Image: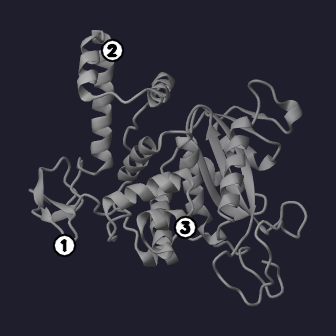
Amino acid sequence: MTTTLCVTLDAINCHQEAANMPQMTAETLVERMKRIPEFILSRIAEILDAYDKESTVAEGILFERCPKCGVAHPRIIKGGKTSTGKQMFRCMDCQRRFTADYGTYSFYSHQSPEAWNELIKMTITGETLETISNVLGVNIATAFRMRHKLMCSLEDEEASTRISDQAELDEKYLVKSHKGERMKHVAGKKRGTPSPKRGISHDQVCLLSGVQRGGGSYLRSFNMARPTSEEIMNLHPHIEEKTYIWTDDCPSYNKLIAALESGSKVVSSYKDYDRVNHLNNVNSFHSLIERWYNKMGGVASKYINRYAALFNIRFQVGRMDPSEALLLVKSRLRGIKGNSFVTIERLKQEKLFSPPELRWEAGQTA
């Protein structure tokens, strides 16, 4: 995985202040640079170097391995262009040609890199499919497929996620949905209608979530209703050993905590909260998931893990500038091990959430 560009709080504050300042000409900027102390110039140079390196990786111009023959640190030269205008490169070891996006979400796409960049930014910021299709000038079905290609790659990238140090674990429940698929034998209902069954039932998709304090997060569904100890063990590859864990009073986490040899604290209600022992971070994540989910009018449960990967990256970029968020997302996707071709057939058939409980019997309310 590539190293992400770090931006300090001071830098963010400077960026916000700069946004309120009048635009400077190049000549004015040069004059001001002459009066800046040497140590400030050094910091600016470090930021620019980090940005150059990050943007190079994000755009796929830096090849650590040849995507065709797999040789490490290959000697690459330009090798013409495709019929659609994409720049091609040639590996001097195997003499085979490829594009910079070979094996990625955009490889089988006729849309331009600029269109994909806009789609990523608008998807991360929560724009609707209708808005995306209008901005890109494409059919709404094309925008839907582009978004799902992106989410498939985000899901592949999330497979290598690991949280550590201090983590809060909890579950988020969403009522199952077959949005976008007409079922004549199932009675309809308005979106947002709660499950007719009381409490946590098999009508609800369980999203296991973990939030590292001051760090990353992980979100994925493995089951319906309340998770068992074995289902929660699916979190094991994504949490480092010795991580201190806070949970609610669900006993199913005990096996995972023992396997990680972790210290832990149970906070069963708000009455148990204090400055250290709480689940505020994961609860905040769940509130954002609820907001994003409702804005979309719900999502089809078979796609829930694709949207979980999207919600996860949205949570991590927070209030980051859209252009910076774009750079972060593209850098992470370039770090996926191996090729991640995303075709229309893969969208329809692969990596769908399909537990036995995710089906509708005749007469059941949707």
To which residue does mark 1 refer? 83
Judged from the image, the secondary structure of the residue bearing numbered disc 1 is: loop
Q: Quadrant of the N terminus?
A: top left
Q: Of the residues under marks 3 and 1, which one precedes in the sequence?
A: 1
To which residue does mark 2 refer? 40
Q: Is residue 311 above or below residue 212?
A: below
In space, the residues marked 3 and 2 are separated at their CA atoms by 45 Å
311 vs 212, nearest the viewer: 311
Q: In the drawing, does residue 317 fall left or right of residue 93?
A: right
Q: Residue type at mark 1: give it.
A: Ser
Q: Which mark is residue 98?
A: none
Residue lying at 73% horizontally and 90% vertically, measured from the top left: 184
In space, the residues marked 3 and 1 are separated at their CA atoms by 29 Å
Taking the image as drawn, is residue 349 in sight? no
Residue 87 percent coordinates (x, y): 19, 60
Taking the image as drawn, is residue 72 in sight? yes
Q: Residue type at mark 3: give it.
A: Glu
Residue 77 percent coordinates (x, y): 10, 53
Residue 186 percent coordinates (x, y): 78, 85
In space, the residues marked 2 and 1 are separated at their CA atoms by 46 Å
Residue lying at 73% horizontally and 51% vertically, measured from the top left: 171
Do callouts 3 and 2 mark residues in contact (Cβ within 8 Å)? no
To which residue does mark 3 refer? 130
Mark 1 Cα-neighbour bin, 10 Å: few <14, some 14–19, many ≥20: few
Q: In the drawing, does residue 134 fall left or right of residue 260?
A: left
